[in-house]
Amino acid sequence: MYTTQLDNGTLNNYAVEPKMTYAEYPAVYEQRRYIVQGAIAALFVAATVLVSFAVS
């Protein structure tokens, strides 16, 4: 932890900042996986809504 002291005696503590890394564009197989996950999520939401309408 990095600590500085001001002229009036107060201490300021600063956290150590981690090294910044950049995100990489997803590969083709990862993009396909995201599409499949989105489709499954959409089907799950649609099924939940249909069941709630059927029950009510």
Image (cartoon, helix red, strand yellow):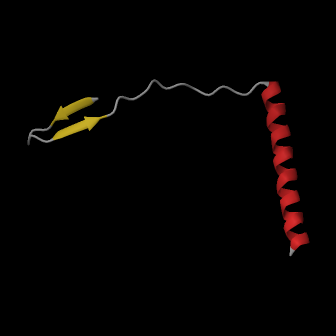
- Residue located at (85% from left, 38% from top): 36
On screen, residue 48 above or below 20: below
The N terminus lies in which quarter of the figure?
A: top left
**Image location of residue 8, percent across then percent down:** 8, 42
- Residue located at (82% from left, 26% from top): 29
- Residue located at (84% from left, 38% from top): 35
Q: Residue furthest bottom?
A: 56
**Image location of residue 55, percent across then percent down:** 88, 72
Q: Residue furthest front?
A: 55
Q: Is residue 17 left or right of residue 54?
A: left
Q: Residue furthest left?
A: 8
On screen, residue 48 above or below 27: below
Examine the image and state in which quarter residue 39 appears. top right
**Image location of residue 46, percent across then percent down:** 87, 58
> Total label count?
0
Q: Is residue 30 left or right of residue 13?
A: right
- Residue located at (49% from left, 26% from top): 20
The C terminus lies in which quarter of the figure?
A: bottom right
Examine the image and state in which quarter residue 28 appears. top right
**Image location of residue 25, percent across then percent down:** 70, 27
